Image: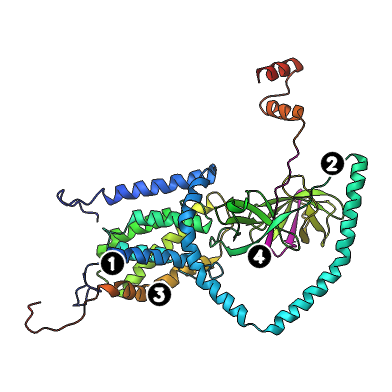
Amino acid sequence: MQPTFSSSRILQPVRPWFVLVTLLVALALNFLPTSAWPWMPDWIALVTIFWSIREPRRVGMGSGFILGLAMDVADASLMGQHALAYVLASYAASTLSRRILWFPLGQQALHVLPLLMLVQFVQLAVRAMPGTELPGLSYFIGPLVGTLAWLPLTFVLLLPQYQPVDRDANRPI
Amino acid sequence: MDHQPPPFFKRGPAPLARLSFYAGLSLALIFIDARFQTLELLRQGVSLLTHPLQQAAHAPVQFFENAASYFSSIARFQDENSRLKRAQLDGAETLLRTRHLEAENERLRKLLDVKGRQQGNGQVTQILYAARDPFTRRVIVDKGQQDKIVAGQPVIDDAGVVGQVTRIFPFVSEITLITDKDQAVPVQIVRTGLRSVVFGLGNGQLELRFMPANADVQNGDLLVTSGLDGIFLPGLPVAKVVHIERDTSYSFARIFCVPVAGVENFGEVMVLDPRATTLLPSQLTTEAAAGGTKTPLKPGAKKRHLKRE
């Protein structure tokens, strides 16, 4: 796999422990006491969508469900609310993965924005059914920030897969 | 992912099947949690796994906060210390007299053979963080099952009622603030003694509902807990009336209040011990159990009913 469709560099296969570590780091980032900053993106949604696009066979709905349950407990929200949102986003991402990877990074980010919005809207719908107060428009700033974070995030998460560039005139590939 | 793989590549169930499995499981969880509230054990189990990670995530934040307070000037602390000493001295007279009055009240109640008032005791806890959930107003405090906190205990700060313990985890517990939407506190207006229930609005304010349009309520009225719920001790300040709308087209007045306590502040709060429950006389409980089902029973029928039990 290449970092972007136009790149001539070929990536090494992903290491499973690295995927696990990034998911745990995303969970820890979500556990930071950031309730005062509503623009904080949902890191778990971002990382789950990233790996669902890049490695749909390793990371998908199962990990989204488990991380969602952890978020529900830590967040004191309705049980299953985050889980449902992450499962749907992960399914959509893995279905779109063949398509999204053909775009340059900026347009990939535009594909990710509706997925992040889906995560917020699913949670809003789940909470609106039993009836709660509605959060303000700042609730939807998080996905925009997450979209902007897509480019640096892609670079960071693919970093361990880059091979050193060694030019060997005698090697066929 | 949508096209069918040849059967010799094992790829597990189809994506759509997996989606319906996980989505169905989540929806079932949502439904059970919203309707029956029977998932507390699952919550506590998951929290045992997430708690260490949460602690780890909070450690650097706490470190920076501690470092900041370490380097803050000593003059500020001296100033605060002297201010607190003065405040304590100011309050000392009232406190001493309150103690005296409470003792006297206790004695008079004994003379009148009325059951004594319960003393409020509790545990001081620290608010760790506000829950990240943007739909509710809840905070997490640092005491849980280990410190024998139980769900339902009232929580106060130095000025008044803050909220109520709603969920307990092994090491932490969750407090729903009185400003949370539809969180209800039975109150009494100090000036008139009128009883009502105050509800959270979700925007930091409270509303006194179901008061007739001509009710005797004024701006600035103080609401204290009435104690009729059997949870809150009577007489704790809850809110102050700030705005009243009397519209003749509605039969109820809309009365808005703001909490007296620093509900949205961070710091220390006190979790009061659960109130000693006063049991109803046995006759009343049997009547309530029987009367809930049908129209009032005849004396004979009641006797038979009791015998069967």
| Circles 2 and 3 on the same subunit | no
Residue A148 - label:
3
The residue indicated by pointer 1 is: A100
Residue type indicated by callout 2? Lys
Tell me, yes or no, whether the highlighted magenta stretch contains residue B255. Answer: yes
**Residue located 24% across and 63% down the image:** A98
Label 1 – label 4 distance at C-alpha: 43 Å
The residue indicated by pointer 4 is: B264
Disc 1 secondary structure class: helix
Label 1 – label 2 distance at C-alpha: 73 Å
**Residue located 21% across and 71% down the image:** A12
Question: Between tags 2 and 4, which lies in front?
Answer: 2
Question: Between tags 1 and 2, which lies in front?
Answer: 2
Return the residue nearer the eye: B168 or B131: B168
Residue type indicated by callout 4? Glu
Label 2 – label 3 distance at C-alpha: 65 Å
The tag earlier along the polypeptide, 2 or 4, is 2
Label 3 – label 1 distance at C-alpha: 16 Å
First to last magenta residue range: B250-278
The residue indicated by pointer 2 is: B115
Horizontally, residue B86 falls left or right of residue A159, namely right
Return the residue nearer the eye: B273 or B218: B273
Disc 3 secondary structure class: helix
